[in-house]
Amino acid sequence: AILFLFRSGWRTAVYRTAEAMTVFAVMTAGLFPLIHIGRQWYFYWLIPYPNERGLWPNFKSPLIWDEFAIGTYFTVSTLFLIMGLIPDIAAVRDLATGWRKKLYALTSIGWTGSNEQWRHYTRGYLYLAALATPLVLSVHSVVSWDFAMALVPGWHATIFAPYFVAGAIYSGCGMVITLLTPIRTLFGLEELITVKHFENLAKLCLLTGSIVGFSYLTENFIAWFGGNPTERAAFWYRAFGPFWWASWTMYICNGFVPLLLWVKKIRTNITALFVISIFVNIGMWFERYVIIVVSLAGEPYEPWANAVYNPTWADWGIMAGSFGWFFMWFLLFVKNFPAVSISEVKEVLPPPRSKASKAHA
C-alpha cells in the first residue's frame, strides 16, 4: 500500500505475493489469542456486544487490544488483496472450466473491464491504500504497547512502537524474498520478477534492518545509562544468561547479516539474497522468543518464578501447526490465483509493435 501511494513502478511484480503473505500471516496471528484464552468455545466473550449476562471485555487488557488490532488489520488487508485481484480473476475466469470457473465468476463480482468500472476501481483502490498505510503503523504500535505498558524489565520502553514497526517491515521484506525466489523459478517468471526487484527489496530490508539494529543498541544503552539495576540485570541476563544463544542469534541475524546488503554484488545475487532472507526470518523469530520467553524467565523479574524454559510437545505442536496453517493457505493461493498482478504488469510493459512497424524495421 505504501509503495502504491508513492507510485513505485517496481512494486507491480512483487506486491501480490506480499499482500497474500500479509493476510495469511494475520490469519495465523489471529489463532493465538484464541489459544491464549484456553477455552476457545468462549471466544465470543472477547467481542464487545450487549448481552443478557452483562459481561463486557476489559478494555485495559492487551488481549482486547490484540483482538481489535488483528481484526482491523485482517479486514483492511483482505479487502485490499481481494480488490486488487478482481481484474485478474476476471481475466482468468473467461478461460477457466469446472469449479474454478464458478469460483472465479463469484469472486470477480461481474467485472467486465468497462471504463466506469475502472474509474471506480482505481478510486477505491487508492482509498484502501490510503487507509492501509497508517493502519500498518498503528497496528504494530498497538501490539508493541502490549509489552511497553507492562512493568517487566526489558519491556517498559518508549522505543517499542517504532522498533516494532521497523521490525515488521524488515521481517516482511525478508519473507517476501524467501517466497518470491521459489515462485520466480517454479512458475518461470524470470522476465517479470527481475534482479532489479530483488535489489529494491534488499535495499528496503537494509534500511529497516539498520533501524532494528539501532534499536538493539539503543535499548541496551538506555538499560546501562539509566542506572536502573533491575533493567541492567535483565539485559545482562539476556546476553550472558542461560538463553545467551537465543539473544546472540537474534543480534547476529538482525544486526550483522543485513550489513552484507551494502555490497551491490550481494544485493544482485538472488541466491545470496535468499540465504540472507532465511537468516532474517530466523533472527526475527528469535527476537520474539527473546522478548517474551527470556524477559519473563530472567532473575530480576519475579525471582520466585525463575526457571529455564523447556518447550513441551504442545509448544512444538503449536509452532509446527502455525507454520503449516500459513503455508497451506499460501500454497492454495498461488495454485488458484495469479501470484503476479496481470493488469498492473501490463501497464508498465512497452506497447506492442504493429505488423507494419515490424516489417519496416
Image: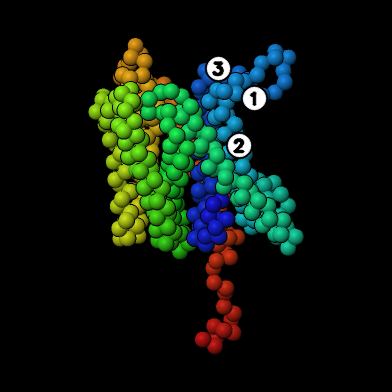
Residue at the (60%, 50%) spot, across then down? 129
Q: Is residue 60 visible?
A: yes
Q: Is residue 142 above or below residue 64?
A: below
Residue 101 in the image: x percent, y percent?
Answer: 66, 49
Q: State the separation of the CA atoms marked 1 and 3.
A: 15 Å
What's the residue type where badge 3 is placed?
Arg
Residue highlighted by disc 1: 47
Q: Is residue 245 above or below residue 58?
A: below
Q: Which mark is residue 14?
A: none
**Crowdedness near tag 3: few (<14), some (14–19) or many (≥20) residues, C-alpha within 10 Å:** few
> In the structure shown, which secondary structural element does the residue marked by tag 1 occupy?
loop
Residue 162 in the image: x percent, y percent?
Answer: 46, 41
Residue at the (37%, 40%) spot, across then down? 215
Residue at the (55%, 60%) spot, across then down? 7
Seen in the image, is 269 located left or right of residue 186? left
Q: Which mark is residue 39?
A: 3
Seen in the image, is 338 located left or right of residue 266? right
- Residue 315 versus residue 298: which sits nearer the camera? 298
Residue highlighted by disc 2: 72
Q: State the separation of the CA atoms marked 3 and 2.
A: 23 Å
> In the structure shown, which secondary structural element does the residue marked by tag 2 occupy?
helix
Seen in the image, is 354 located left or right of residue 201? right
Q: State the separation of the CA atoms marked 1 and 2.
A: 13 Å
**Crowdedness near tag 2: few (<14), some (14–19) or many (≥20) residues, C-alpha within 10 Å:** some
What's the residue type where badge 1 is placed?
Ile
- Residue 128 versus residue 15: which sits nearer the camera? 128
> In the structure shown, which secondary structural element does the residue marked by tag 3 occupy?
loop
What's the residue type where badge 2 is placed?
Thr
Residue 141 in the image: x percent, y percent?
Answer: 51, 37
